[in-house]
Amino acid sequence: MMTQLAERRYHERFDIEAPILYSLFTSQSSGDFNATAKNCSEGGLCFEAGDKLLPGQYIIVRLNQPALADIPRPAKERVKTNAIARVRWCVKNDDLYETPYCVGVSYC
């Protein structure tokens, strides 16, 4: 499965560890949810979240400015601090992770 994902990627991925906020892109306020970005590229982001998100859902992703200081320069040039993104996949993490879901999004 991982080989198939790697072959479909158009942009180089960069490992990061940064707190983010996301909210559902809906007509009603969903509130903000905390998550942790795990990697990024020009085209999207992978993060760990406490809630299951559905493929096709739109979300707003926000990375706070202080978190940028700890991100390596090549990743910093590609990550978006505020973006609308579309959920591409959401999988249940195994027991090794603190948060229950891993989510992949593409920037809109």
Image (spheres, rainbow, N blue to C red):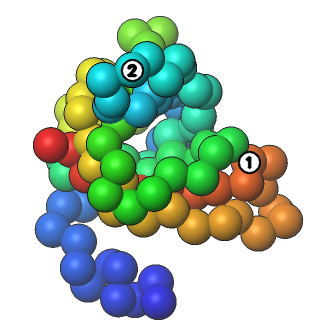
Which residue has dot 2 on it? 28
| Alpha-carbon span between mark 2 and mark 1 | 26 Å
State the residue at coordinates (26%, 84%): 7
Mark 1 Cα-neighbour bin, 10 Å: few <14, some 14–19, many ≥20 = some
Q: Where is residue 80 in the image (x, y as percent from the top left)?
A: 25, 30
Please state if 101 lies on the left or on the right of 39 as rendered: right
Mark 2 Cα-neighbour bin, 10 Å: few <14, some 14–19, many ≥20 = few
Tag 1: residue type?
Thr
Q: Position of residue 75 (x, y in %)?
A: 31, 40
Residue 43 seen from this side: yes
Whichever of callouts 2 and 1 sits on the residue coming sooner in the sequence is 2
Element type at mark 2: loop
Element type at mark 1: loop
Which residue has dot 1 on it? 99
Residue 56 occupies which quadrant of the picture? Answer: bottom left
Q: Which of 56 and 98 is in front in this view?
A: 56
State the residue at coordinates (33%, 29%): 26
Tag 2: residue type?
Gln
Q: Where is residue 10 in the image (x, y as percent from the top left)?
A: 15, 68
Q: Position of residue 19 (x, y in %)?
A: 56, 27
Q: Which of 68 and 34 is in front in this view?
A: 34
Q: Nearer the viewer, residue 95 or 88?
A: 88
Please state if 57 lies on the left or on the right of 106 as rendered: right
Q: Which residue lies furthest to the right in this view?
A: 95
